[in-house]
Amino acid sequence: MKKGITLVFVLLFIVAVDAQNSGKELVQNTEQATKKLADSTNLGWKTKGNFSLLFNQSNFNNWLSGGENNLSGNVSINYDFNYKKKDWTWDNKVLASYGLIQSRNASFEKKTDDRFEFNSIVGKKAFGQWYYSFFLNFRTQFTKGYIYSKNSLGVEERNQYTDFISPGYLTFGPGLFWKKNDNLKVNLAPLTSKLTFVDKSFTLPNKKYFGVKEGESIRYELGFYASLYYKLNLMTNVSAENTLNLYSNYLENPQNVDVDYSLAVVMRINRYLSANILFQAIYDDNAFEGLQTREIFGVGINFGF
């Protein structure tokens, strides 16, 4: 009798252990299947874009405190198209924006924004969240740029100073790419080539034009490049997109690091309306010996695609 009871307990124990192992195996298989499904859904091309139109108007009539009627508008596109397959990633971003302001007493329309930028980085997984990478960045503007001044009669004049691909910047090189997710990325490229393109007609005697010598149209640099992209939600319906690019030229004054930082804050009112803040700061002693900044704020129409 005791042997029979013992045998029953042994059988029950074996069944329980087998059931436990089967349960663990089922959980593991489920986790693996879920991970595989998640990985497979992230494979291939993923696209995301946003179109924004900002508008601002100021109108004054018998306003004793002073003021000048003006009308301004700014249009921008931010488009991502990324690819992933097994150990390979390829991230691409296009940024384009253009804005104008017209003041009642001004002689000319003036630009508030003029930018075209293309970023591309391909990576092959190395270890952890690090990838061997190769990146390319191209930047320029769409239309002519002017320097404004007033003559001896107080009349406003302008002289053309820039144009499409004058300047134009092409930067590329191999490196290491760290990517936690689509909202946090870092790229380090210690052997980066940088080409600056200009129109020879803008070069001045015995002076450099965006670092390009008189009579030439291209400047070559070799240096260290680092970039950071970080997008976060500050609170509900408020997001901030940060981009920081740093470059040091080994061949000339490596201590003078080029800095390009931009911040885009979007405060969504509803699906299509938002308040946008755009800020950019640039330091490049080849272009200007000082800090360049621009800021745009307005209520706009946003459309995601």
Image: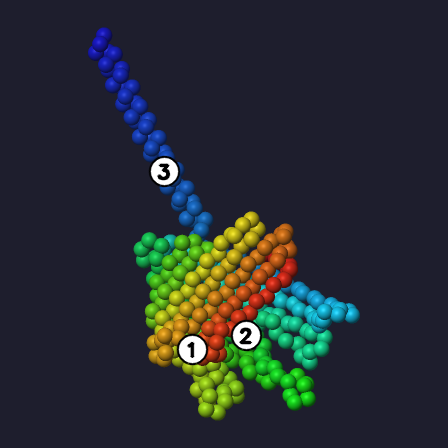
Nearest the eye: 109 or 15: 109
Q: Residue at x 43, y 49 (%)?
A: 40
- Residue nearer the viewer, 244 or 301: 244
Q: Is residue 62 left or right of residue 28?
A: right
Amino acid on which the number 1 mark rests in the picture: Leu
Q: Dividing the image into 4 quarters, which one contains the N terminus?
A: top left
Closer to the eye: label 3 or 1 = 1
Q: Residue furthest top?
A: 1
Distance, label 3 to label 2, CA atoms, is 53 Å
**How many numbered circles does the render carry?**
3
Point out the tag, 3 or 2, that comes first from the N-terminus: 3
Q: Which residue is mark 2?
A: 141
Is residue 297 visible to the viewer in this orientation of the structure?
yes
Q: Check disc 3 and give the amino acid type.
A: Asn
Q: Secondary structure at mark 1?
A: strand
As helix, strand or loop, the secondary structure at mark 3 comes to: helix
Residue labelled with disc 1: 195
Q: Above or below — where is 154 with respect to 231?
A: below
Query: Can you tell which mark lies on residue 29?
Result: 3
Give residue 294's position: percent from left, percent from top: 55, 69
Specify which label sits upstream in the sequence, 2 or 1. Answer: 2
- Does dot 2 land on a helix, a strand or a loop? loop
Residue plotted at (55% across, 59% down): 265
Q: CA distance from mark 3 to mark 1?
A: 52 Å
Residue 69 lies in quadrant: bottom right
| Between 11 and 52, the one nearer to me in the picture | 52
